[in-house]
Amino acid sequence: MERIILLGPPGSGKGTQAELLEKNRNFICLSTGDLLREEIKKESEFGKNVKHYLDNGLLVPDEIITEFILETIEKNRFFEKKVVFDGFPRRVSQADALNKKLAEFSSSIDSTILIKLDKEEIIKRLTGRLVCPECKKVYPASHSEICDNCGAKLVKRTDDNEEVIKKRINVYNEETAPLIEYFNKLGKLIEIDGNGSIEEVHNKIVEVINKQ
Ligand code: AP5
């Protein structure tokens, strides 16, 4: 498989699994959330425009995000590389735009892997999540407060409070979940259970990739 989308509710483990695919299977990870947070940190004009949406658990409007991501794909020639998409598409309109852009280069998405997880576990994971402000590595609540990778002090994401997490889950159900049917109809949807250890979920994904 060359190009995979990781789909799933907030906190289902998309970022964690994308990072493992990058490390163990030579995928390039395109994380929309990380790209947006980087722009916010740089205080670029783009970052200033999107901050409000991230802080409030809302999706950034298509007219802001879609072109930004499609340009990133084209500039880096991701259409001909092994890429895992984490966080894009999140609306049917974004999926249509992505498919169209890839088709321009005779490329396509091979599979969409849906990581399923219930609300209770999502809230538990996200209220405890720690992230490295420097290298972006993500850790569970049980980790010490220092990044293994670069030694920076770990922080919490501004949108990881219970109120915003619940909002993000609602936004996922309303705006992103229709993509499940969308990719199912295209015969490109594979569902996996997001419960179990990080390693166990990774093994399930690798099994799926190896079968294709
Ligand atoms: P984004 O950063 O993509 O957030 P998200 O989709 O809400 O996903 P998360 O990063 O919260 O969770 P995850 O599934 O990656 O889980 P993780 O691996 O970290 O997007 C943020 C915002 O940007 C959006 O709200 C929106 O505003 C905007 N945005 C982004 N893309 C957009 C788009 N296309 N269009 C419009 N707006 C867009 O894991 C969570 C925690 O659980 C971690 O602590 C981890 O260590 C732990 N964990 C992971 N797996 C396991 C496991 N198996 N067992 C135990 N713990 C685990």
Image: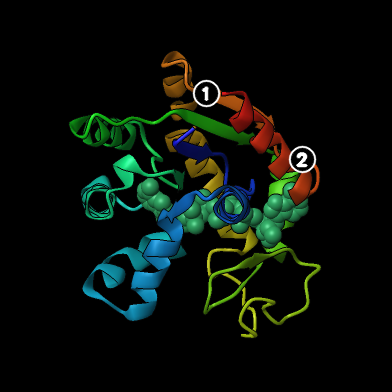
Give SS at disc 2. loop
Quadrant of res 157: bottom right
Residue 208 image position (x, y, % from top left): 63, 29
Residue 150 image position (x, y, % from top left): 61, 81
Q: Rounded to the nearest whole Å, what is the CA distance between mark 1 and mark 2?
A: 18 Å
At label 2, the amino acid type is Asn
Q: Residue furthest left?
A: 104
Instruction: Look at 47% across and 15% down and name the residue there.
Output: 187
Residue 54 image position (x, y, % from top left): 43, 61
> Which residue is tagged 1?
189
Instruction: Look at 65% across and 36% down and name the residue there.
Output: 205
Ligand 1 visible in quadrant = bottom right
**Image-based side of 43 in relation to 6, left or right:** left
Colouring style: rainbow
Instruction: Look at 26% across and 76% down and name the residue there.
Output: 44
Q: Of label 1 and label 2, which has the lower sequence position? A: 1
Work out whether 166 lies above or below 54.
above
Work out whether 129 lies above or below 18.
below
Work out whether 40 lies above or below 120.
below
Question: Closer to the observer: label 1 or label 2?
Answer: 1
> Which residue is tagged 2?
195
Assess whether mark 2 and mark 1 are in contact (beta carbons under 8 angstroms).
no
At label 1, the amino acid type is Leu
